[in-house]
């Protein structure tokens, strides 16, 4: 079995800007978890799936993506889930919320994925440091980040599937949104 998740992955030039902050956290606070995946906004959190079902997953992501039009995403500086996570906030976005709702509906109806709708509200964000940020370091770190700006925008043009390779997350497939495919 492999572990997967579904996300909106940031364009390369923004991934590099986010990577700068992830590396800062590694050098200063020994945080490595954030470095294990490209910059992204999680739509469907990690789940296990049998390897022989991967093609079916990719087809389902294609089906979902074909009904989505590209949309603009804007960041909202740094924020935190106190006392363990530092992230880049994402401005409220009706299109991102619709994508999350459609993805939840699309995948929760399919028994093979064993994906349940989350009870907590959708809070789109781009993680910088998380599980390996010690509580004792959080407040020092947060004092630094709470005054920093991160204002970027980009057009989300697809939905990606990431697979865990036992060390990191690899983007294995991106289904383009309808307009991004020129339809």
Image (cartoon, helix red, strand yellow):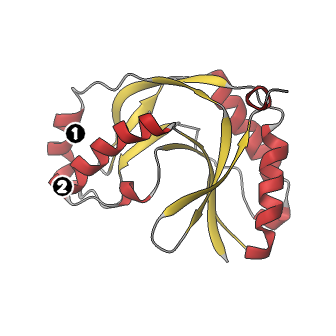
- Residue 38 visible? The answer is yes
Q: In this view, does 65 lie above or below 31?
A: above
Residue 88: give x, y in percent of width and height: 39, 35
**Where in the figure is residue 74, as x and y percent of width and height?**
49, 23
Residue 27 tag number: 2
Answer left or right for 98 relative to 75.
Answer: right
Say whether residue 82 is visible.
Answer: no
Name the secondary structure under disc 2: helix
19 lies left or right of 110: left
Tell me, for residue 142, which label it has, or none.
1
Vertical relation: 135 (above or below) 124? below
For image coordinates 27% across by 58% down, the residue present is 31
- Coordinates of residue 13 in the picture (x, y in percent): 43, 35
Which residue is pictured at 18% across the width and 55% down the height? 27
Left or right side of 156 for 124: left
Residue 22: mark: none
At x 54%, y 23%, the residue is 92
- Indicate the secondary structure of the residue bearing disc 1: helix
Structural crowding at the residue carrying mark 1, measured as other residues with C-alpha within 10 Å and reported as few (<14), some (14–19) or many (≥20): some
Of the pair 38 and 141, the residue shown nearer to us: 38
Q: Quadrant of the N terminus?
A: bottom right
164 is higher (above) or lower (below) than 133: below
Q: Residue at x 24, y 30 (%)?
A: 146
Of all residues, the one furthest to the front in this rendering is: 182
Q: Nearer the viewer, mark 1 or mark 2?
A: 2
Density class for disc 2 (Cα within 10 Å; few <14, some 14-19, many ≥20) is few
Seen in the picture, residue 52 relative to 123 is either above or below; the reply is: below
Measured Cα–Cα span from mark 1 to mark 2: 16 Å
Q: Tell me which corner region of the image, top left, top right, bottom left or bottom right, holds residue 19.
A: top left
Q: Where is residue 6 in the image (x, y as percent from the top left)?
A: 64, 51
Q: Residue furthest bottom?
A: 1
- The mark that comes first in sequence, 1 or 2, is 2
């Amino acid at each position: 079995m492999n572990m997967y998740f579904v996300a909106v992955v940031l364009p390369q030039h923004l991934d590099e800007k986010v990577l700068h902050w992830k590396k800062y956290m590694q050098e200063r606070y020994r945080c490595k978890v954030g470095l294990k995946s490209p910059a992204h906004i999680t739509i469907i959190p990690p789940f296990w799936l049998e390897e022989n079902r991967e093609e079916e997953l990719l087809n389902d992501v294609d089906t979902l993506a074909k009904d989505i039009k590209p949309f603009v995403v804007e960041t909202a500086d740094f924020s935190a889930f106190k006392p363990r996570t530092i992230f880049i906030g994402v401005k409220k976005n009706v299109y991102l919320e619709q994508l999350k709702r459609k993805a939840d509906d699309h995948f929760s109806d399919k028994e093979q994925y064993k994906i349940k709708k989350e009870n907590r509200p959708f809070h789109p964000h781009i993680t910088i440091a998380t599980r390996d940020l010690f509580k004792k370091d959080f407040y020092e770190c947060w004092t630094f980040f709470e005054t920093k700006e991160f204002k970027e925008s980009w057009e989300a043009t697809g939905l990606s599937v990431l697979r865990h390779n036992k060390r990191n997350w690899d983007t294995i497939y991106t289904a383009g949104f309808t307009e991004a495919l020129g339809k």
